[in-house]
């Protein structure tokens, strides 16, 4: 089992920055990618960014490329999402997820953290 706890959300103005954190515990060595997803009101959950616990691989949704940066601290078992130049359309609940390396499904999810960007 893997447990994920997000933090760092809040209310900001357009153009501001926020950094989200995802603290992982449990069998983190058994996971594949670590990902960030978001769900806006009335919309489906969508992919934002992903990273591996080792190596340099990262991947971003086109909508956040150049503004968001995903990173990790292996010593702290924590994944971060640095969000710059925030836009009102970035408003959503942001979720951290851990991928099953066999099925490639994101099997483990955090509880989510709200990010609200005012115009």
Image (spheres, helix red, strand yellow):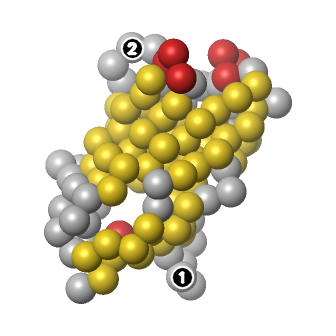
Q: Which residue is drawn at 50% across and 18% down?
A: 74
For the question of whether residue 79 can be seen, the reply is yes
Give the class, few, some or many, for how many residues have Cα within 10 Å of label 2's Cα (few <14, many ≥20). Answer: few
Q: Is residue 37 in view from this perspective? A: no
At x 72%, y 42%, the residue is: 108
17 relative to 32, above or below: below
Q: Position of residue 113 (x, y in %)?
A: 56, 61
Q: In which quarter of the image is residue 69?
A: top left
- Give me the residue at 18% from left, 49% from top: 66
**Number of disc labels:** 2
Mark 2: secondary structure: loop
How many residues crowd around disc 1 within 10 Å: few (fewer than 14), some, or many (20 or more)? few
Q: In which quarter of the image is the C terminus?
A: bottom left
Q: What element carries label 1?
A: loop
Picture layout, residue 19 above or below residue 51: below
Residue 97: horizontal and vertical position, in percent? 61, 44
**In percent of the image, x 61 and y 59: which residue is there?**
112
Q: Is residue 37 above or below residue 74?
A: below
Position of 69 with respect to 36 (left or right) is left
Residue 21 on image: x %, y %: 48, 44
The residue to which callout 1 is attached is 41
Label 2 and label 1: CA atoms lie apart by 35 Å
**Residue where numbered disc 2 is placed:** 55
Q: In which quarter of the image is the N terminus?
A: top right
Say the numbered circle drawn on residue 71: none
- Given contact means CB atoms under 8 Å apart, are the residues at marks 2 and 1 in contact? no
Q: Quadrant of residue 70?
A: top left
Q: In this view, does 105 lie to the left or right of 50?
A: right
* Mark toward the start of the polypeptide (2 vs 1): 1
How far across and how far down the image is residue 99, in percent? 63, 34
């Amino acid at each position: 089992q893997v447990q994920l706890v997000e933090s760092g959300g809040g209310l900001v103005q357009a153009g501001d920055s926020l950094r989200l954190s995802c603290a992982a515990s449990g069998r983190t060595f058994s996971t594949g990618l670590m990902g960030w997803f978001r769900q806006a009101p009335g919309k489906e959950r969508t992919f934002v960014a992903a990273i591996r616990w080792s190596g340099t691989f990262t991947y971003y949704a086109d909508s956040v490329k150049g503004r968001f940066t995903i990173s990790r601290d292996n010593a702290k078992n924590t994944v971060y999402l640095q969000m710059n130049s925030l836009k009102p359309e970035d408003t959503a609940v942001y979720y951290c997820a851990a991928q099953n390396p066999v099925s490639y499904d994101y099997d483990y999810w955090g509880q989510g953290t709200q990010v609200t960007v005012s115009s």
